[in-house]
Every structure is written in C-alpha cells, then in structure tokens.
Amino acid sequence: MKIITNQSPSRKTPFAPQWCYHIAYEFIKNVNFKKVAQIILEKEKQILKEFPPSTKSSVDGYTGLGKKSLTSRYEHFNIFLWKEKEIQQLEKHVLDFHLRFLKEINIKGLSHFNLKGWANVMRKGEQIKAHLHSAQPTSYLSGHICVQCQETSTYYINPVNQLNEPYVKKIPNEVGQLIMFPTCVPHYTDIHQGNNERITLAFDLNYKSSL
C-alpha cells in the first residue's frame, strides 16, 4: 500500500485554511480483470435497457458522461451485489483495504457503513469531469478500481485549494489499481483516446445512519 498525505502548513492566522487528507492505493493481483470487464460490459446493455437515467439534477453524478451512460444509472444497482466470483473477490479486497488503510494512518474508522458500487464505462473521446461524491457531515471514503484502461490518469484536487492555482495530484491508471480517498476530494480524468472502453469500478463507503 502506498499512501499520499496532503497536509497544510501550520497556520499563521486563525482564518488561514487547514487541510489534511490521504490518498491510498495498491494493486490487486489475483483477480481476472478481463473477466470483470466482460461482466460489466454485458451488464451495461441490460441495465441501460431496463432502467432510466437518474432523475436528479446531476443525472450522471456530475461526471459529464451524460444520460446514455451506465454512470447515469448508478442509483439502480449496486455492483457488489452481483454474484460473479470476480466481483465478490473485489468486494473482499475493498473491505480489507479499508481496514488496513485506517490502521496505517492511525484513524478509527466506522463500523457501521454500507458499500455501494457502480461502474463507469467510457468510450473514445469521453472524459469524467471534475466532481466529488459528497461534502456532507456524514461523508466518509470513496474509491475506484481500474478494470480496463489505456494511457489515462485520474487527477485529485485539494478540496480547499480548488481555484486560482489548485493543488492537483496526478495518478496514472493501471489495471488492477485500487485507490481510496475521502469522499469530499474532487477528481477527474483525461479524455479517453483508446479504441477499447475505459472501465472503472467506483464505490462509496456510506455512513449507515445517513441512508
């Protein structure tokens, strides 16, 4: 596991901003990601046909992928409830990673949370625009697993310093990469230029009493 810590300098005035957040990642080795990609693409057809896009004003979670995307149906399914062996393996990795991440940064995590996952499928010319998953008092942790990619990166923006000269951390995407970060951290991707789909499995760890 690699952890990137972003912490503000000591304040010189009582009104200066403060921040401290961590981004953790590692690589999952024992899962067949070609099979995971196949499962997601097959399910995508079914979900797009069966369910309408979200009725929320954000439609696609502010990603910019639009009403025709799988992302715009994120309310209608939880990928971790799928029964395929590979998906269940990924759920175990996420839950284990969560515990080890908290131990590494010496933070007591939540014992009562729900794991909600969905998939983002991007075609050539598409991009996930800057967005964040939540900035509420109950916000916790989010993340994604790279299932299929080709020369793209994800960019994480300092949630306090977002304007003028924002601090942005670039992390290149690689198959099998599992990343976890605070739900309030904005992030976006490159424009996808590959001929094959760029596929990620995204997730939120949601504070249970807020659901």
Image: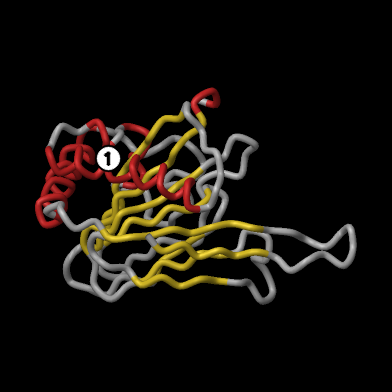
| The N terminus, quarter of image | bottom left
**Left or right: where does residue 126 sit relative to residue 133?**
left
Q: Residue at x 12, y 37 (%)?
A: 84
The colouring scheme, among rainbow, by chain, secondary structure or one colour, is: secondary structure
Instruction: Judge by depth and name the residue closer to the eye, 130 or 141.
Output: 141
* Residue 161 percent location from the top left of the image: 67, 66
Decide: is 164 above or below 44: below
Q: Residue at x 12, y 38 (%)?
A: 85
Decide: is 155 above or below 104: below
**Left or right: where does residue 62 sit relative to residue 72?**
right
Q: Quadrant of residue 88?
A: top left
Label 1, secondary structure: give it. helix
**Left or right: where does residue 36 sit relative to residue 66?**
left
* Residue 134 percent location from the top left of the image: 55, 44
Q: Residue at x 46, y 68 (%)?
A: 155
Decide: is 13 above or below 87: below
Q: Quadrant of residue 74?
A: top left
Q: Residue at x 30, y 33 (%)?
A: 77
* Type of the residue with mark 1: Glu
Instruction: Judge by depth and name the residue closer to the eye, 145 or 11.
Output: 11
- Residue carrying label 1: 91
The number of numbered badges drawn on the structure is: 1
Q: Residue furthest right?
A: 13
Instruction: Judge by depth and name the residue closer to the eye, 54 or 37.
Output: 37
Crowd around label 1: few <14 · some 14–19 · many ≥20 (10 Å) = some
* Residue 114 percent location from the top left of the image: 41, 30
